[in-house]
Image (cartoon, rainbow, N blue to C red):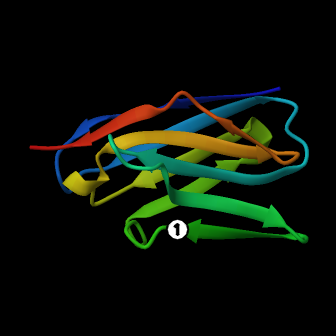
Amino acid sequence: QVQLVESGGGLVQPGGSLRLSCRASGILFSTTEMGWYRQTPGKERELAASFIIGGGATRIVYADSVKGRFTISRDNDKNMLYLQMNSLLPGDTAVYYCKRRVRGQDYWGQGTQVTVSK
């Protein structure tokens, strides 16, 4: 069993910054993805940024809409995943979810609301 808990969401003005955190616990070996997804009402959940792990390598994937503004990072010793979000736009408003794929199964956090508004 894997548990994910996000924190760090909130209300921010356009152009501002937020840092999301996700703490993972449980049996985490054989992780093949650690990432951030986001969802707005009436739309499907979409990738924001993710570490893809496999074949002896790790690559980072960003959605085109966040490239150059968001940075994903991790602290494996602490089982933490982060998303630094800069130059936020109203279009970034969404519930942000932490995801971890462990031994072929996807686990999700409860989500944290990010609202970008004046």
Give x and y (percent) for residue 100.
71, 44
How many numbered callouts?
A: 1
Give x and y (percent) for residue 68.
40, 72
Q: In which quarter of the image is the N terminus?
A: top right
At label 1, which amino acid type do we have? Answer: Tyr
Picture residue at 37% right of the left edge, 69% below the top: 65
- Asked if residue 8 shows in the view, the reply is no
Give x and y (percent) for residue 26.
82, 27
The vertical placement of 26 against 117, above or below, is: above
Q: Is residue 27 left or right of residue 90?
A: right
Picture residue at 43% right of the left edge, 32% below the top: 112
Picture residue at 54% right of the left edge, 38% below the top: 21
In this view, the residue farthest toward the left is: 118
Helix, strand or loop at mark 1: strand
- Where is mark 1, residue-wise? 62
The vertical placement of 3 against 102, above or below, is: above
Q: In which quarter of the image is residue 107?
A: top right
Q: Quadrant of residue 115?
A: top left
- Asked if residue 28 shows in the view, the reply is yes
Q: In which quarter of the image is residue 11?
A: top left
Q: Is residue 34 left or right of residue 66?
A: right
In this view, the residue farthest toward the front is: 42
Give x and y (percent) for residue 69.
37, 65
Give the crowd class for mark 1: few <14, some 14-19, many >=20 residues within 10 Å: some
Camera-side residue: 16 or 5? 5
